[in-house]
Structures are given as C-alpha cells and as structure tokens.
Image (tube, helix red, strand yellow):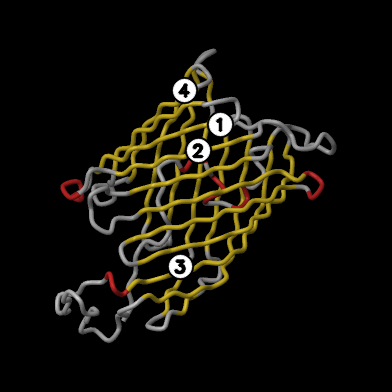
Amino acid sequence: MSLCAQQPAQYSLFMLNPMQWNPAYAGLDHSLSISAGYRKQWTQLPGSPAGQYIATHLPLYFIGGGLGLQVENDRLGAGRFSSAQLNYSFHRPLGNALLAVGFGAGITQRSLDGSLIRTPDGVYEPGSGPNHNDPLLPVGLESGMTPTFHAGVYFQSERFEAGLGLRHLTRPEVELPSFNFQLERSFFLQLGGHFDLGDKLSVHPALLVRSDMVETQTDVAALFRIQQNLLAGIGFRGYSNDTGDAVIGMAGFQLSENLLLAYAYDATVSGLRNANNGSHEIMLQYNLNRPLVQARLPRIIYNPRTL
C-alpha cells in the first residue's frame, strides 16, 4: 500500500527568502542575511500545518560564492518533518548580472505519532492505549532520518531575477519501523522583478511554481515598497478552479536599517474555507547591508530583492 501527498511546506512570503527553495541563492544578498519565520495554516482546523524555519547565508568572495545554512520544522497532524541543510553557491559575473550554481546537503527527519491517529474501526478508550485495528499503523512515536541533496541555478540582475531549484535529487527513503517514507524530487521555479514607480514607490512582482511532475501549484504576488520603510502587497495561490487556494494580503515595516518585519494573511477561497479562519505567517529578517570584507569584491554589489 502507498500514500502520496505534497511534501514541501508552504509559505506566502516566498519572495523574501529565495534560499529556502534554491541553494544557489546563498550569498546573493551580498551581505550577512538572517531570516526567521513562523506559519500557522488553516487556523481552527484540527491538525492543520504549522511550520518554523531559520535561514542564514553570506557571500564568501575568496571561494567565489556564498555559504548558507537553513533549519526547518513542519508539523501536519500526526506527522512532523524536520531538516537541516548546508548550501554552497558558486557565483559567476555575466556583464552587469550574476549567475549562480548551488548545491545543498543535509539531513531530513520524518516522525509519526501513532497515538494521534484515528481510524473508523479503531478503539480509543480513555486510560488505555490506542487500537487502530490496522497492523500497518503505529500506536506510538516512530521516526527516522536520511541524508538528502539539493541543487539549483539562479540568475540575478538589477531589474530581474530567476531561479530553478531541485530538492531531493536522489529521492531518498526515510525508514520507519512500520513503513518507509519516500522523499519525492520537487522542482521550484522562481521569477522576480524590481521596478521604480517614482522616488518613493517601487513594485516587486514575484512568481513561484512548485511541482513534483505529478501535481503543480503556483503563487503569484506583487509587493510595493512605500517611502523606503513600508511594504504592502497582494498575492494569489493557484491557477485554475481546482488549484485555487487563497488570496493573500501582505504587509511589512522596516524596523531599522537592518531589520524587516513582514506578515501575510491567507484568505482561503477553496472549499476548505468553511472549515478554517485562514492562515497567518510572520517573518523577521536581518541584513547587515554592507560587505563583510573589503577585498576581492565582485564587479557589482547590489541587492535588488532587499526591498
């Protein structure tokens, strides 16, 4: 017996942390960058997804690229998905742009708490352990780990950027006592633009396409930067009646020269809207906004994505 479902966690502020989907982005903020985020999806729906992550990366010009580290934890019902990943990106100048090729290696853990599972034929009496009446399902906590590898390419110029990331290159399996959990190969296409609309207003459109070559989902958004310290934006997840998931509102405030606070709210538009009160996501991002060293810098130093 096999069961298939979407594996990567979902985030609405994807344009603010491209390295989460693509190891080639490591170092492309051209300074030390640290992002931390929390998302609670489909609030008031029992067992709904909740995820946290922290990611940091910086350019290291003496090795011709950048290094990054990211840690993520995502919980969905009785399952928990945790990972830690180290990324390296090689940067090559192309005129007034940069082309980066990146690789990532890490550890992924998958856990399943059988005590939280409920089946139609199970027996669940207070004071006694669960009995699922299904020999394939565990009654306690099971977990396993596996190494996994990722790759990507990323192009960055002053007005345009694009990346293609690939997770779980070898489709590894996590072995649990009751069953094996296969990590499917997933592709992430990112597109972004940066355009000034005046001295105090700029717009930053973004697109994320996620696919395992069986199912595909899209996120499209536009963020506006107002007077150098305010963010406002709108987005939509889905591309058809069957994939339409949410309308997304985004806002942010530049707390200081180095610190950005951003928030997103998803208003569900699918049939699930009658069972939840939407999704909440918050991100805190720090950027040093200056080179870490003063020697052997690349020919251009800019960061169009830092809004």
Local packing at callout 4 (Cα closer than 10 Å; few below 14, some 14-19, many 20+) is some
In which quadrant is the C terminus drawn?
top right
Q: Say what amino acid the circle numbered 1 marks.
A: Leu
Label 2 vs label 4: CA separation?
14 Å
Q: Say what amino acid the circle numbered 4 marks.
A: Leu
Disc 1 is placed on an element classified as strand
Q: Position of residue 88 (x, y in %)?
A: 68, 54
Local packing at callout 1 (Cα closer than 10 Å; few below 14, some 14-19, many 20+) is some
| Numbered tag placed on residue 230 in the rendering | 4
Mark nearer the N terminus (1 vs 4): 4
Q: Which residue is mark 3?
A: 184
Residue ID at (34%, 39%): 236
Local packing at callout 2 (Cα closer than 10 Å; few below 14, some 14-19, many 20+) is some
Label 3 vs label 4: CA separation?
38 Å
Residue ID at (30%, 83%): 136
Mark nearer the N terminus (2 vs 4): 4
Mark nearer the N terminus (2 vs 3): 3
Q: How many numbered discs? A: 4
Q: Say what amino acid the circle numbered 3 marks.
A: Glu
Q: Is residue 42 left or right of residue 232?
A: left
Q: Position of residue 277 (x, y in %)?
A: 23, 43
Label 2 vs label 1: CA separation?
7 Å
Q: Which residue is mark 2?
A: 284
